[in-house]
């Protein structure tokens, strides 16, 4: 049976591509790999070996929530130190931290980009550190974001949102 390797890319609508480009380059360190000649779309990546992981396409108006169907997307970081660094940078840049979440095997935080798309920035422990039995996300992550208390999701939150 064919098996998916990893998330390939996301395409997000943006009211102002320049503002969104600045957010993704300054906060997450992505780089632009190419631009559509018409200027209506840009392609960005965190890696040097990918054409893109994120594309931003010009939208005339995405303030109407009926045009959004994304709950959130997540950027996995190489280390918990990387998560801490971006968390600190977001706070210093005045970007609101919506929440910090302890998912047992991972720890992350949530922010919004300039167009209101929710982003999770997280680190996941190696599989060898995961629980051998039971619910994968039930445990406690063995670190914190500089003392910020991480929220554990309740059963009600798990079934009602993400």
Image (tube, rainbow, N blue to C red):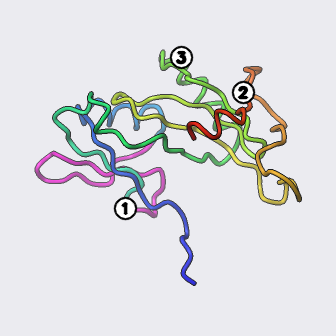
Residue in view at x 85 percent, y 54 percent: 134
Magenta residue span: 30-50
Residue 146: image x %, image y %?
A: 74, 23
Q: Which of the numbered marks, if any, corresponds to residue 160?
A: none
* SS state under label 2: loop
Q: Label 3, on which residue?
A: 92
The residue closer to the viewer here, 159 or 9, is 159
Q: Label 2, on which residue?
A: 151
Residue furthest left as drawn: 38
- Categorize mark 2 by other alpha carbons within 10 Å: few (<14), some (14-19), many (20+): some
Residue 154: image x %, image y %?
A: 72, 32
Q: Is residue 4 above or below residue 141?
A: below
Q: Earlier in the sequence, mark 1 or mark 3?
A: 1
- Quote the CA–CA distance across marks 3 and 2: 22 Å
- Categorize mark 1 by other alpha carbons within 10 Å: few (<14), some (14-19), many (20+): some
Q: Give residue 108's quadrant in the image.
A: top right
The residue closer to the viewer here, 103 or 162, is 162
Q: Nearer the viewer, mark 3 or mark 2?
A: 2
Q: Residue 38 vs residue 1: left or right?
A: left
Residue 57: image x %, image y %?
A: 24, 45
Contact, mark 3 vs mark 2 (Cβ under 8 Å): no
Q: Earlier in the sequence, mark 3 or mark 2?
A: 3
The residue closer to the viewer here, 134 or 76, is 134
Q: Label 1, on which residue?
A: 51
Specify whether residue 150 is painted magenta: no
Residue 70: image x %, image y %?
A: 42, 43
């Amino acid at each position: 049976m064919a098996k998916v390797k990893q998330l390939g890319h996301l395409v997000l609508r943006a009211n102002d591509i320049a503002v969104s480009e600045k957010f993704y380059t300054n906060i997450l360190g992505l780089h632009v790999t190419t631009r559509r000649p018409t200027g209506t779309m840009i392609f960005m990546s965190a890696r040097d070996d990918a054409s893109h992981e994120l594309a931003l396409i010009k939208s005339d108006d995405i303030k109407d929530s009926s045009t959004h169907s994304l709950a959130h997307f997540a950027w996995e970081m190489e280390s918990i130190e990387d998560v801490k660094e971006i968390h600190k940078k977001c706070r210093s840049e005045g970007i609101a931290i919506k929440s910090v979440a302890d998912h047992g095997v991972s720890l992350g935080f949530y922010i919004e980009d300039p167009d209101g798309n929710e982003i999770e920035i997280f680190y996941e422990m190696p599989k060898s550190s995961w629980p051998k039995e039971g619910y994968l996300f039930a445990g406690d992550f063995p670190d914190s974001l500089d003392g910020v208390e991480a929220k554990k999701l309740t059963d009600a939150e798990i079934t009602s949102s993400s």
